[in-house]
């Protein structure tokens, strides 16, 4: 599975990770909005985000653990932190989307009071915290992936200024795929 993401061309990877899940999500959300059952469309939005996130994380996981084998022992990157960021990202996204689901349920359903006062303040703080943790975990994953790729390319100890460009491209991965994946394909072809 790791080699699949590393050997694909950039347009194939874009189709697999972004375009196909996006089209499936748009079609299913359009269908579910017409059914007017909030439970279905909230689950569909959660599924779309999860599907998009898993594809992107599998690509980054392939780089960190598949290509990471090419790094010499003196320049190793802390790969195990990838799993910590991964778990933190999904837990915080889960909490965030569940609270959004609850707020949508309260505003949609008759007989259920919308939280007011202290309860609403608590929900907003938890929403903000979960979003912040999710964002920080995403930054950690992006930085680790960019460090790994740049270390493989240079085979030396790198600094922040060496990998910041790759980090931005990994963060904006729908665009970055078209720049980074050819570099990864070259590294894979050199390894074979």
Image (cartoon, rainbow, N blue to C red):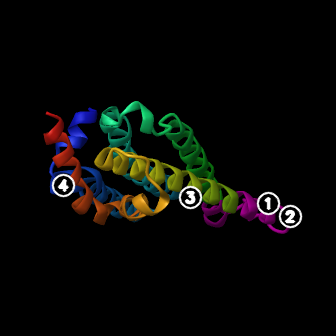
Q: Nearer the viewer, residue 10 or 73?
A: 73
Q: Which residue is mark 4?
A: 182
Q: Secondary structure at mark 1?
A: helix
Using residue 181 as the reference point, say whether residue 81 is left or right of it.
right
Q: Residue at x 63, y 61 (%)?
A: 109
In this picture, is 25 found above or below 153? below
Q: Which residue is mark 1?
A: 122
Q: Position of residue 147 (x, y in %)?
A: 42, 50
Gap in Å between the C-alphas at discs 3 and 2? Answer: 25 Å
Marks 1 & 3, CB-CB < 8 Å contact = no
Q: Position of residue 6 (x, y in %)?
A: 23, 42
Quarter of the figure that contains the C terminus: top left
Q: Residue at x 18, y 36 (%)?
A: 191
In this picture, is 12 found above or below 176? above
Residue 173 found in image quarter: bottom left
Gap in Å between the C-alphas at discs 4 and 1? Answer: 46 Å
| Majority secondary structure in the magenta region | helix
In this picture, is 42 found above or below 70? below
Gap in Å between the C-alphas at discs 2 and 4? Answer: 52 Å
Gap in Å between the C-alphas at discs 4 and 3? Answer: 27 Å
Magenta residue span: 103-126
Marks 1 & 2, CB-CB < 8 Å contact = yes
Is residue 39 covered in magenta?
no
Marks 4 & 3, CB-CB < 8 Å contact = no
Q: Which residue is mark 3?
A: 135
Seen from this angle, which residue lies furthest right?
118
Q: Is residue 53 visible?
A: no
Dot 1, crowdedness within 10 Å: few (<14), some or many (≥20)? few
Q: Residue at x 43, y 52 (%)?
A: 158
Q: Which mark is residue 118?
A: 2
Q: Which mark is residue 111?
A: none
């Amino acid at each position: 599975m790791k080699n699949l993401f590393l050997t694909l061309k950039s347009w194939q990877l874009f189709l697999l990770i972004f375009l196909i899940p996006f089209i499936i999500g748009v079609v299913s959300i359009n269908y579910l909005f017409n059914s007017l059952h909030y439970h279905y469309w909230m689950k569909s939005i959660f599924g779309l985000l999860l599907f998009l996130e898993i594809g992107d994380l599998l690509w980054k996981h392939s780089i960190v653990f598949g290509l990471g084998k090419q790094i010499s022992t003196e320049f190793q990157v802390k790969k195990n932190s990838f799993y910590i960021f991964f778990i933190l990202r999904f837990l915080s996204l889960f909490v965030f989307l569940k609270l959004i689901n609850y707020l949508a349920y309260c505003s949609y359903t008759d007989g259920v009071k919308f939280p007011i006062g202290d309860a609403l303040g608590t929900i907003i703080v938890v929403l903000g915290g979960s979003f912040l943790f999710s964002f920080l975990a995403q930054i950690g994953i992006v930085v680790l992936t960019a460090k790994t790729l740049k270390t493989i390319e240079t085979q030396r100890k790198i600094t922040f200024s060496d990998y910041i460009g790759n980090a931005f491209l990994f963060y904006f991965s729908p665009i970055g795929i078209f720049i980074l994946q050819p570099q990864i394909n070259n590294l894979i072809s050199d390894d074979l």
